[in-house]
Amino acid sequence: MKFFVDTAEINDIKELHEAGLLDGVTTNPSLIAKSGRDFKEVIKEICSIVPGPVSAEVAATDYDGMVAEGRVLAKLADNVVVKVPLTLDGLKATKTFASEGIKINVTLCFSANQALLAAKVGATYISPFIGRLDDINIEGMELIEQIRVIYDNYDFDTEILAASIRTPNHVTQAAMAGADVATIPPAVIKKLAAHPLTNAGLESFVKDWKSTGQSIL
Ligand code: E4P
């Protein structure tokens, strides 16, 4: 499973990229607002750090506006993926972008039927929002499982990008359900490496090594 980081914070992106953990980046208007920076500048900077796909979301909600904005975003860097919402206008825009060779991440997916439509119009990625479904007492991970079956039944190339990931368990479950990608907040990626037994084991190894009085170098 590929790892994207879900943030517009440059320091986090640099740190995780240097650790070799990133295959790409996703942003959304809320994350851009949180960064307090100019949208296009921050996307260009992220694209210069991470060579993988970087999702930049349109702000318009009508077909003409999404297409006009998406074409501008796609020109910011070769690795920009235009993110559009899963509405009928968003699906129409996806079809247009796909015919122009622009990569598309269809976002705000909350049902298997929505995911089916996105694949039919040529989405590069579909983003089912796990955490937001869990928030309303619907098992988000079941959606990933359903989409996996549907896409495999018909050999769709659209990649399943598990989004709205909130916990390390979400990451494990998305990988087990066969998601192609998970986009994960920086804090959750860092938590994946942590285990109390690793810390306890390391502490005793360090103590015992010191007691030998030896040095490897
Ligand atoms: C996906 O691309 C979205 O940016 C993101 O995963 C949303 O996550 P949230 O529901 O935690 O805001």
Image: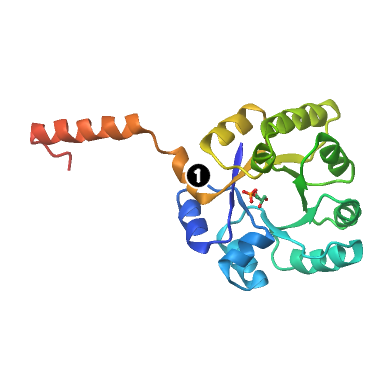
Q: Which residue is mark 1?
A: 189
Q: Quadrant of residue 66?
A: bottom right
Viewer-closest of 28 and 93: 28
Q: Residue 186: where, in percent of width, then height?
A: 51, 50
Q: Would you say residue 20 is visible in this rendering? A: no
**Which residue lies at the image location 81% right of the left edge and 32% below the top edge?**
151
How crowded is the residue under tag 1: few (<14 C-alpha within 10 Å), some, or many (20+)?
many
Q: Quadrant of residue 145?
A: top right
Q: Would you say residue 32 is visible in this rendering? A: yes
Q: Residue 106: where, in percent of width, then height?
A: 78, 49
Identify the amino acid type marked 1.
Ile
Q: Report the label total.
A: 1
Q: Residue 109: where, in percent of width, then height?
A: 77, 44
Residue 109 in the figure: left or right of residue 203: right
Q: Is residue 119 above or below residue 45?
A: above
Residue 116 in the figure: left or right of residue 127: right
**Which residue lies at the image location 83% right of the left edge and 31% below the top edge?**
155
Q: Quadrant of the C terminus?
A: top left
Q: Residue 62: where, in percent of width, then height?
A: 89, 62
- Secondary structure state at the residue bearing disc 1: helix
Q: Quadrant of residue 128?
A: top right
Can you tell me whether the CB of the residue at mark 1 lies under 8 Å from the nearest atom of ligand 1? no
Q: Is residue 148 above or below residue 73?
A: above
**Which residue lies at the image location 66% right of the left edge and 44% below the top edge?**
163
Q: Quadrant of the N terminus?
A: top right
Viewer-closest of 76 and 200: 200
**Which residue lies at the image location 89% right of the left edge and 46% below the top edge?**
121
Q: How are the colours assigned in the image?
A: rainbow
